[in-house]
């Protein structure tokens, strides 16, 4: 019986005696060695972005970019919580005038004074699609976004190297004056190995505040996210600023590997750090490898990894220290248990191989490995109402992953019994502390 779970890809073991390995290394074009990227961006800071948009993306384990207008009194608390959950909060100017020249730095500073996020405010979207002072944009942001590229003699689909001008990244308008074909455009991106970005204002029938231009059926977006989830091995869905950082880092990074004493040491470096960003977004790496089990560490951090097709795959941060690939004795596994854990986050996940995905889809819930937790014996199960529920997890970190390895909920144990997630039918992995258990919503 094959009990391997594709989203739980960590394995550790000894190198085979006399195992030889080559130092072939590669940085993936797109995160997780996918074929393309897609970013969903939302303008104006509408109430519906907080009440409807964020929860929709969280449902599917994806994150989006929300561009707020400072003086339009957005729901700072709501957007702040979304930022804590991994969404990108970006600038759409102070006033939403015809041209935001003079507001490039001040709008960024105002948002950063209210919203805390890992990479800061690194993306700006221009009101009315009018490009302001490009020099001021690039002194304050990683990327500046226009509207349809074709409106300004630019391609609507960006290439694997991003836009030709980082102050003019394209985004296809959606809604009544644009397109609602999210699936078709992402399919084109996969075919072209490109980067597609969408520009949405409010949602049809929702509380949009000032975001009244070209409303979009939220169901169309959900259909697109469903397709993306089903094709997660091909399409990387991530915020605009994160994709921009990934491209810039990938183009600037140098990767080298050497072997000594049964270990491989990988150096991943670049020199593009500036006043805007450290450019420390994780890059997806693979290293030619002949062993069957390995542990990957960068500094003191253990990296999620998997071995497939003669390579070890992992995500690592440039300039964050040497990456060491080594063997470790796994020891005998206890009966009905697994040392496998899901990825740490959707933004740093390793795409599953198609063969693993097929094995996963054919496995029944009873055939999947179970996990005994720590001394307090926390447990995770699905109750009669379809909620993933945990017990005895007070004070412990709880993360729920869907069948593709994407984070759909992160929280902390609060009480003796706690409902943590309900959603679409299927298999999920619940990580409590450093242990994981498979559950099935039916």
Image: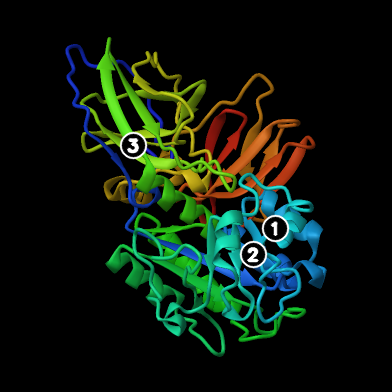
Classify mark 2: residues with Cα within 10 Å, few (<14), some (14-19) or many (20+). many
Q: Between marks 1 and 2, how big is the CA–CA gap?
A: 13 Å
Q: Tell me which label, 1 or 2, sits earlier in the chain.
A: 2
> Could you tell me if the residues under marks 2 and 3 are in contact, i.e. CB atoms within 8 Å?
no
Q: Tell me which label, 2 or 3, sits earlier in the chain.
A: 2
Residue at numbered disc 3: 254
Res 60 visible: no
Q: Between marks 3 and 1, how big is the CA–CA gap?
A: 31 Å
* Position of residue 130 measured from the top left corner of the image (x, y, whole percent): 58, 78
Q: Tell me which label, 3 or 1, sits earlier in the chain.
A: 1
Classify mark 1: residues with Cα within 10 Å, few (<14), some (14-19) or many (20+). many
Residue at numbered disc 2: 66
* Position of residue 282 measured from the top left corner of the image (x, y, whole percent): 47, 41
Looking at the image, the residue that sits furthest to the top is 261
**Foreground: disc 2 or disc 3:** 3
* Position of residue 201 measured from the top left corner of the image (x, y, whole percent): 63, 77
**Foreground: disc 1 or disc 2:** 1
Tell me which residue sits at (18%, 26%) in the image.
22
Query: Horizontally, is 171 left or right of 232 in the view?
Result: right
- Compared with residue 59, is residue 362 higher up or lower down, i.e. above or below? above
- Compared with residue 65, is residue 100 higher up or lower down, i.e. above or below? below
Tell me which residue sits at (74%, 57%) in the image.
111
Tell me which residue sits at (38%, 68%) in the image.
158
Q: Between marks 2 and 3, how big is the CA–CA gap?
A: 32 Å
Viewport quadrant of the N terminus: top left
Res 79 visible: yes
> Could you tell me if the residues under marks 1 and 2 are in contact, i.e. CB atoms within 8 Å?
no
Query: Horizontally, is 14 left or right of 83 in the view?
Result: left
Residue 108's disc is 1
The quadrant in which residue 307 appears is: top left
Q: Could you tell me which secondary element the residue under label 1 belongs to?
A: helix
């Amino acid at each position: 019986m094959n009990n391997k779970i594709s989203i739980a890809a960590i394995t550790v073991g000894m190198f085979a005696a006399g195992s030889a390995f080559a130092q072939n290394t590669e940085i993936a074009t797109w995160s997780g060695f996918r074929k393309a990227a897609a970013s969903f961006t939302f303008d104006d800071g509408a109430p519906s972005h907080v009440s409807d948009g964020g929860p929709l993306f969280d449902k599917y384990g994806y994150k989006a970019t929300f561009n707020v207008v400072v003086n339009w009194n957005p729901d700072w608390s709501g957007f702040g919580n979304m930022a804590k959950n991994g969404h990108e909060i970006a600038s759409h100017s102070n006033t939403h005038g015809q041209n935001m020249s003079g507001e490039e730095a001040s709008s960024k500073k105002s948002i950063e004074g209210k919203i805390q996020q890992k990479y800061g405010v690194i993306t700006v979207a221009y009101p009315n699609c009018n490009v302001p002072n490009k020099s001021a944009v690039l002194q304050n942001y990683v990327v500046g976004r226009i509207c349809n590229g074709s409106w300004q003699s630019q391609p609507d689909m960006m290439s694997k190297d991003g836009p030709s001008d980082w102050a003019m990244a394209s985004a296809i308008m959606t809604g009544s004056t644009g397109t609602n074909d999210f699936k078709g455009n992402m399919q084109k991106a996969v075919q072209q190995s490109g980067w597609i970005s969408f520009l949405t204002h409010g949602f049809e029938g929702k509380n949009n505040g000032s975001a009244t231009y070209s409303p979009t059926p939220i169901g169309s977006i959900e259909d697109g996210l469903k397709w993306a989830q089903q094709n997660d091995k091909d399409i990387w869905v991530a915020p605009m600023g994160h994709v921009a950082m990934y491209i810039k880092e990938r183009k600037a990074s140098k990767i080298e590997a050497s072997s000594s004493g049964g270990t491989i040491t990988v150096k991943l470096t670049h020199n593009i750090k500036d006043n805007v960003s450290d450019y420390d977004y994780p890059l997806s790496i693979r290293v030619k490898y002949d062993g069957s089990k390995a542990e990957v560490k960068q500094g003191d951090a253990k990296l999620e990894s998997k071995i497939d097709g003669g390579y070890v795959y992992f995500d690592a941060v440039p300039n964050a220290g040497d990456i060491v690939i080594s063997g470790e004795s796994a020891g005998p596994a206890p009966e009905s248990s697994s040392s496998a854990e899901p990825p740490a986050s959707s933004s740093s996940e390793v795409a599953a191989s198609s063969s693993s995905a097929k094995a996963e889809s054919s496995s029944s819930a009873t055939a999947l490995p179970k996990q005994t937790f720590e001394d307090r014996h926390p447990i995770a199960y699905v109750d009669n109402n379809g909620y993933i529920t945990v017990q005895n997890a007070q004070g412990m970190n709880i993360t729920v992953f869907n069948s593709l390895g994407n984070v759909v909920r992160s929280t902390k144990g609060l009480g003796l019994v706690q409902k943590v997630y309900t959603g679409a039918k299927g298999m999920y992995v619940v990580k409590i502390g450093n242990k994981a258990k498979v559950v099935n919503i039916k």
